[in-house]
Amino acid sequence: MKRFYLIPLTAALLWVTPAPAQSSDDWNFLSDPSVFHDIHGMLSAWLKETAFALLDERQRTIARIATIDDLKARQQYWRRHMLSYVGGLPERTPLNPRIVGTLDRGDYRVEKVLFESRPTFYVTANLYLPKNGKPPYPAILFPLGHETGAKAHEAWQRCLAGFARRGFVALAWDPLGQGERIQMYDEDLHDSKMPGSTVEHTIIGMQCLLTGTHVAQYTIWDGIRALDYLLSRPEVDARRVGCTGNSGGGTHTAYLSGLDDRIQAAAPSCYITSWRRMLESIGPQDAEQVFPLWLKDGLDYPDYLYAFGGKPFLMLTAIRDFFPIGGARASFAEAHGLFAKLSLGDRITMFEADDGHGYSLPRREAAYRWFSRWLQGTENTEPEGPLTLATAEELQCTATGQVKTEFPGAADVFSSNRKLAAQLRSERKPSAENVRRHARELTAYEAAPGPVRVTRFGRLERPGYAVEKLVYESEPGISIPALLFLPDAGEPRKAAVVFADAAGKGAVGAEAAELAAKGYIVLAPDLRGFGETQLPLDRRETFVRNFGDYKTALTALLIGKTMPGMRAADLVRAVDLLATRGDVDASRLAVAGRGAAAIPALLAALFDERIRSLALDGMLASYESVVNERIQQGIVDQIIPSALKYFDLPDLIAAVSPRRVAVFNAVNPLGQELTLGRMRPVFADVAAEIGVRDREETPFVPILDRFLKSNR
């Protein structure tokens, strides 16, 4: 029988005298490097060490490639995994292409094209056509980077015109979130709601991850369908097709060239580097460039070259790029060595320019030489000529300048994700057994074996209780600083609570002291990446403001881990620590999780039945809400990829049954607290107690105490 409780939060509150004020220095005792070497960098160092071990293993695998058949096997390995990462590719549907205008540019012309990469999923594109020479011409597929202006950006126009003047047909299209295809368009701002296309991509990317797809599925499919359109043109010789682009365009040059055999020559600019150098410098970039399990599956940047199967591949690089040049050189050395061993060394080369990120003139002219050599049979060394740029308005394909306003009912990534999430919900069979099994698999949760190693850092005596400062090892390389609150009196064996807050143990110190005064033993840990174990973050950075500790969370996904799964393991080790104490009543062991610590607390209870009761304060109400809301903030470290294929957060609560769970002040994807009326339908079908409280006026401890005592 379903049990549903509503806690009357304003009734029978028990007030206690506040504990003595505590300084942060008392609670945060490992920040001094003389005590613990760089506790703030511990998690980052552990993730990198794990990643580097995976990259070392990959090197041993690559060293075994000795034949063309081995190379083909590696190519197929990459393709299988790539298609798996993006959730597969959709079926081809009619492109319904339309030429909506033409610009005469003197020695070439530009056609303005609209097509549908998916039904009513409109793509705005410019086709550059030569006036000299004789068709059919070789062709260039030109995916764009993140620079402002999209297809009207100066460097892209110069490059596309340069190809057209040299006898190539070239096609460029607005990527998602750019040009005429802003996904979060605001009619009042006349621009995106978000500060830049990479933020748009990554917000969309978090939604896609939850549904088991990937934002790169959309961007790759746009590129494949753009190639379909390009090859449908009678002016194009389908046997002579190249692909090039810079930055995000270099990214998609690598993706498309590896996935589509119709591309015969490739030249990604300012993208190819190495994951070792990336992790040592700027870390993971926007969502379309990061695939969960990539490093765990033994992949690195040189695999893009192997995926192209020995066809002509030019790496265009910048010595002063933020994509590390050392990584580009290392990847080229690896790939060139392998290709030379297979007598394919002349098929790949690397061009360096002493400049910064962008498709600069030296790289553009190197690209002209490369593609003319391989697709026209003679290397064109003619310098790039002057160009009068077209305006964005002249190049736009919609009358309003935005697909959103031109086609109000058109599909976008949000509507596609919402539709998919609804379909997944109808297909889910969230039995407790299935939920537990899939949650363990998707979070990569692993329980550490054996006794917990504990190091103590002193004891504070307070009236009625004491506080022990300690560190416990969650797994080798991960040390969790914690505060253990011990009542002076009470039962010989006491109820115990693990109280984790995303803001760190210092944020719950006063509440833990109140609970100790009520007779509870309380352990307040800094789960990895929280409190003292968090890297200092510059809140002025766009990605930090919108996503929090993005680099740590995405690095975890690359190595096959998740932050919720690892933090759940930290909590279970805290339970291990308490369960071995003679003064703890193991039958009255509870966990409380607040903020981003709530989902790890929920997972810990799901995986460990010693947790007899669970309180969740400020938890994200559901993963489906992330898909249904256009904007989210600060939830990247709470994402479990593919979760919505098998469960949502309320399903996890249901799977904890018959143990009792209380949910207080659930939040939406922006972190805004929900009213009780909005919480009820979310948790209507699970055995959970729900409530809201005024954080300014209603103390949490009396409510938590009442809930825990009601479990006895």
Image (cartoon, rainbow, N blue to C red):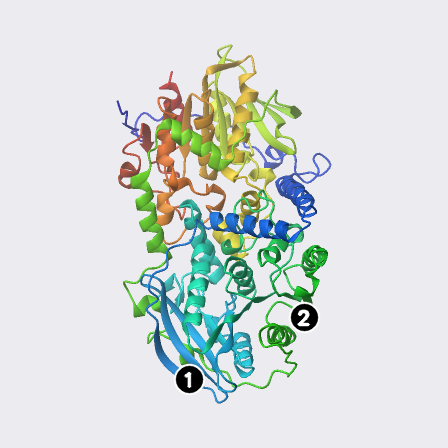
**The residue tagged with tag 1: helix, strand or loop?**
strand
Q: Is residue 187 visible?
A: no
Picture residue at 55% right of the left edge, 75% below the top: 155
Establish if 486 lies above or below 271: above
Image coordinates for residue 501, horizontal then vertical, percent: 49, 35
Identified at 32% across, 29% down, the residue is: 689
Q: Is residue 414 above or below residue 12?
A: below
Determine whether, in the image, residue 271 is placed left or right of residue 219.
Answer: right
Q: Is residue 645 above or below residue 302?
A: above
Q: Give the residue furthest to the top.
A: 492
Please give the residue where the numbered disc 1 appears in the rendered image.
103
The three-letter code of the residue at mark 2 reads: Asp
Image quadrant holding the C terminus, namely top left
Crowding near pointer 2: few (<14 within 10 Å), some, many (20+)?
Answer: some
Residue 174, relative to residue 76: is it above or below? below
Dot 1 alpha-carbon crowd within 10 angstroms: few under 14, some 14 to 19, many 20 or more: some
Would you say 209 lies left or right of 651 here? right
Give the x, y percent position of residue 321.
65, 64
Read off the residue under disc 2.
355
The residues tagged by marks 2 and 1 sit, at their Cα atoms, a distance apart of 33 Å
Q: Position of residue 686 (x, y in %)?
A: 31, 30
Mark 2 against mark 1, which lies toward the viewer? 1
Is 516 or 3 nearer to us in this picture?
A: 3
Quarter placement of the N terminus? top left
Task: Name the kind of residue labelled 1 in the image.
Answer: Leu
Percent x, y for residue 32?
69, 38
